[in-house]
Amino acid sequence: MIPFGEKHLNDLFVMDGLQSVSARDKILREIVSNSLAHRDFSNAYVAKMVIERNQIFTENCNRSHGYGSLNLSNFAPFPKNPPISKVFREVGLADELGSGMRNTYKYTRLYSGGEPQFIEGDIFRTIIPLNEAATGTVGPFSIVKKGEVSGEVGGEVSGEVERAVLSEVKLDMEQLKSLLDFCNTGRSRKEMQDYCGIKAQSYFRDHILSPLLRYGLLRMSIPDKPKSSKQKYIRN
């Protein structure tokens, strides 16, 4: 389930204090390990994780200890499969009892700006809200492997400028490097948008193309006619 989530959700640039973290991976770890640690294994109901445009939701048969939505401020964690939870803590898939819900709240806020829902019952449901940045750029970027990109974008952008670029451009470091490499040859807006796998022209223009032009990572082939139908964008 975790690789499935990694395949279909973007790993957005997120800062937790002064440290860059993968909020996507943190969320997936918590909701998948929670599904196993709290599952009622005597029930044949098939666990599921569904990724939609605006949310992820999981469903799992459950040894319910109450009914209704759980509130972070007053919920009381209850161990449902202590041996499994113990193993998960040993291998790093879980922390202390109750930490999963707190971590999911924390990283969902960082990832999409929303708040998750936890609904207790015979079927336990978790709902994680998503924004367009989480699901809007899928496709060719998945071929870029972690570890192939240095700490700078193309060796030219570093330090505060790099952080500023990544805070505005709705791509992570690997995706940005891949797009800039693609633009070593002049590309049209549509070619770039198709390469990113983004359907919404306004989203691509506002959150990717405009910031890249503003920070000088791309230049126009016809700067005197920015709206020309023959306009190409070339890496600086």
Image (cartoon, helix red, strand yellow):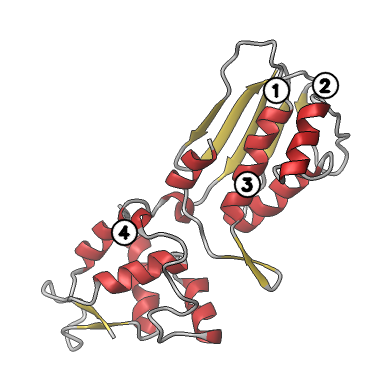
Residue 87 shown left or right of residue 177 in the figure: right
Q: Quadrant of the C terminus?
A: bottom left
> Alpha-carbon distance for marks 3 and 2?
24 Å
Q: Amino acid at mark 1?
A: Arg
Please name the residue shown 43% across and 64% down the image: 171
- In space, the residues marked 3 and 4 are separated at their CA atoms by 24 Å
Residue behind mark 1: 39
Which is more foreground, mark 2 or mark 4?
A: 4
Q: Earlier in the sequence, mark 3 or mark 4?
A: 3
What residue is shown with label 2?
A: 66
Residue nearest the observer in this picture, 23 or 132: 23
**Residue bearing mark 4:** 196
Q: Amino acid at mark 3?
A: Ile
Q: CA distance from mark 2 to mark 4?
A: 44 Å
User: How busy is the neighbourhood of tag 2: few (under 14 within 10 Å), some, or many (20 plus)?
Assistant: few
- Please state if 61 lies on the left or on the right of 97 as rendered: left
Quadrant of residue 226 in the image? bottom left
**Distance from Cα at disc 1 to Cα at disc 3:** 18 Å
Which SS class for mark 2? loop
Mark whose residue sits in front, 1 or 2: 1
- Give the residue at mark 3: 27
Hey, what amino acid is under mark 4?
Answer: Cys
Q: Nearer the viewer, mark 4 or mark 1?
A: 1
Whole-percent x, y for residue 91 in the image: 72, 43
